[in-house]
Image (tube, grey):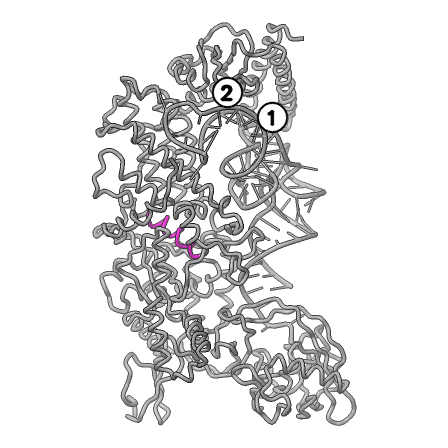
Amino acid sequence: MAYDPRPVEPVIYKRWLDAGVFQPRPDAEPYVIVIPPPNVTAELHVGHALNNVVQDVLIRFERMRGRAAEWLPGTDHAGIATQNVIEKQLAAEGNTRFDLGREAFVARVWEFVRRTGNTILEQLKTIGCSCDWSRTRFTLDPAYSRSVREVFVRLWDEGLIYRGHRVIHWCPHCLTALSDEEAEHHETQGNLYHIKYPLDDGSGFVTVATTRPETMFGDIGLVFNPKDKRHASLKGKRVKIPLSGVVIPIATDDAVELGFGTGLLKVTPAHDANDFEIANRAWPKEEKQLIMTEDGRMEKSPRVPADLQGLDRFDARKRIVKQLEKDGLLVKTEQHQHAVRKCYRCDTVVEPRLSDQWFVKMKPLAEPVLAAYHKGEYDLVPERWRASYENWMKGMRDWNISRQLWWGHRIPVFTCANGHQWADREDPQACRTCGAQVEQDPDVLDTWFSSWLWPFATFGWPEQTPDLQRFYPGHTLVTAPEILFLWVSRMLMSGYHFMGKRPFRTVYLTGTVRDTQHRKMSKSLGNGVDPRAVVKLYGADALRWTLIAGSSIGADVILDPNDLDTTFAPGRNFANKLWNIGQFVLGQLPKQVQALEAVDRRQLTLADRWILARASNAIAGATAHLENFKLDEAAKRCFEFAWNELADWYVEAVKPRLSSSSASTVHAVLLYCFDAVLRLLHPVVPFITEELWQKLPGRTSEELIATAEWPTVLQQFMDSDADVQFERVKKSIELIRSIRAEYRVAPKTRLKATIVARGGDRVETFEGERETIMRLAQLESLSLNGIQQGVGAHAVFGEGSEVVVALEGAVDVKLECERLSGELTRLEKQLGSLAARLTNESFVSRAPQEVVAKEREKEKAWRDQRDVLAGKLKSLGCS
RNA sequence: GGGCGAAUAGCUCAGCGGUUCAGAGCGCCUGCCUUACACGCAGGAUGUCGGGGGUUCGAAUCCCUCUUCGCCCACCA
């Protein structure tokens, strides 16, 4: 019977909810993760799935270790993104937000958010996320909004917020300013136009190179580098802007690169941040005129030729180039690769625009955070992000926090008719200085100005709530590297600045989910894997397995959207295997099974001791790997234990004993091992482990694996001797199977075999497992230490102990001779290279002694083996 | 322009100084319905560990370099 997760998973999730296991234990040391709040408009995609499953693995692990596990969920109001969604809706109805007006528009967004804002949180439940839903937060909650306002006022009072008049990134589609981080670079193939500007004295032309000819009407002058001899004579001269005829001066500035273009730079101070700086140096008094409207059209300005006014900037560019060409003012057009900044929300090419915005001074916030990093107060995992993180923290510029939107936290700056201005925690009725009428700033705050407070605003700050005291600072932050700068670094800044403490100990940066061509999964490419579809097809556990076991720490996850079956088969297969191990074990166990501790240790066979040792090894390994964030290795070690050790060997070895008088010992061992591996696997595949664990003998219905204790290593079962000995048994069985397959011995044919343990070692190993070997190697009889003859296979086990497996009957002597001599040749060759190494003076003298000694031992063992082989060939009468 | 990462079996990836380190899963080949599992069992095949140098007694593993992909950062218009 195959396991079907579909009817199981929702029932299990509900059981967890009903039992309240996702809420932190009352009296325990906390372990806190705050979710990176997804946008209220978001639908679960596979990137979310990866990110949140990682968090769930960590939180479930710590919960089982007895910590008060707090995984705080919530959503982000996502100013631009959400506003865009509603504006798109309005557009479909033939309206704009301006038709509705601010209040009605905001009401409409709220209505949308109330209706669908929890979609993604509900979807997280289907993949098993064990968030503390009782503490779900939203960045526009009243309490959260108070935190945001408090932070703004404090920064204002500290003088860290100021009004800046400068060129910022402007999105002509979203109609708002953006921060540096929100305007993303995209390499673009563009053109570099070489344009003639006529000298106004009629003495000729100068040539200027630009990628954006449409900005030339905003030119305030031309500059060249003072060291540039080519243009020395131009200083103080004036040129006419083509098409408009406006006369502008020529000056010098060090910022001009000597090697680029013609060495002459047109300066457009209102539409280029760099030019703004140059203009401030060269012509500080000159007016800096905007020549484009907010939505990216050519301004109705006397500087802009009438036929271009109102044209979109890119259409204007085309028209201008055509006209210049016609007028003979276009010298040439070069292909030019350069980076264009685009709005991170709508992909529109951003227009640099001179405007007044609110800024936060970043240096005083960043410096302590960087210093704390150097002191090791928090870590980035994987560590390779160090360089770019440090670099960014050092070079960060002031943060533009005002957005010309309606959806978000309104900026609490008030200005009165007499010009008094301040930031206020409450909405004032009148100016607090002069009593005049006041007006609030119309803009809202950058979304990240609220999410940067997430680790403490969610717990009630600035109120000193019990939650805040208990759950701050948190422990692990799991997120995608894309928002390291946008979000993580700022949380660190706010955490240190307002709380005086780091917000978390470890920043775990996951990889990116990509398709087989290594392209990021995205809606527009249509190459996404829909986690909801995966859950429906294979179950949440299979999805989780592939995401966790499928890639190592911080590495990208490659999924094939065109072959879900192959992509998720490993998880599905493994779940099924676990299920069937469960079917078997549960079918065997009686209602009462004695505890492992109660078993007389003298009753334990080699196989028992071996599997218990492997269990301890798996517990130790999985625990250490989880502690080191190596989730894949933890998962794989458990997989090995469950499948390759418990199911493949122990269960098989033990089957005959289940109907014997020693069955109760086997029951105890089986139960212990199965129970342990279910617990170890629970963080990764929570549903099936819960389902099976509930059915174990002795479980009451109130007990849940989700809050069960994490297994600990049983020191008394760390048994390396059992490991070595059982490995020999395994090896001998594998050898016999191998021979059987090679000689095509029919499965039903029972062979006789002989095992010779040489050097007097450990015959009892095989004696004790005689039944097992016979059964698993399908033998009719097995003799130990018999005379070595007939045909067969042999092998040498570590430490010089040797086993010869001789198979009698059903094996062709001629074939065996060929096989043996082939083996002998191979062995001689290996021996040759080993001997060469051992006679190499530099190896013997320079390599560590243990290594040399080990090689010597090996040589001895191989020699013996060779002799045995030779003897065997002889005794068989091979030529 | 600066920085980072990746390149290992047909595919997705582990391994990151010591020949049992050349591995796993999926796929492939050959047998098997062996008292849980064909989403399975048993047995196999497959790789000059991207190219080229170097360090070392010894390199997939360290250094340099090249090639190809990817990412991050960036005020040469």
The residue at the point 29 percent across, 45 percent down is: A706
Q: Which residues are magenta?
A: A48-60
The question of residue A715 being in magenta is answered with: no
Residue A419, relative to residue A785: is it above or below?
below
In this view, the residue in front, A597 or A393, is: A597
The residue at the point 39 percent across, 44 percent down is: A626
Instruction: Judge the density around disc 1: few (<14), some (14-19), many (≥20) Cα neighbours within 10 Å.
Output: some
Q: Residue A322, how many percent across, how many down? A: 71, 82
The residue under label 2 is A737
The question of residue A59 being in magenta is answered with: yes
Most common secondary structure along the magenta stretch: helix
Question: Is residue A376 among what the camera can see?
Answer: no
A296 sits to left or right of A337: left
Q: Amino acid at mark 2?
A: Arg
A608 sits to left or right of A852: left
Q: Chain of mark 2?
A: A
In this view, the residue in front, A43 or A395, is: A43
The residue under label 1 is A844
| Helix, strand or loop status at disc 1 | helix
In this view, the residue in front, A49 or A854, is: A49
Q: Quadrant of the C terminus of chain A?
A: top right
Image quadrant of residue B33? top left
Q: Residue A450, how many percent across, how many down? A: 37, 70
Q: Amino acid at mark 1?
A: Val
B70 sits to left or right of A687: right
Confirm or deny contact between disc 2 and disc 1 (CB under 8 A): no
Give the mark nearer the N terminus: 2 vs 1: 2
Q: Residue B17, how many percent across, how many down? A: 55, 37
Res A524 label: none
The residue at the point 39 percent across, 24 percent down is: A652
Q: Residue A247, how many percent across, how many down? A: 67, 92
Looking at this view, name the residue that lies furthest to the right: A203
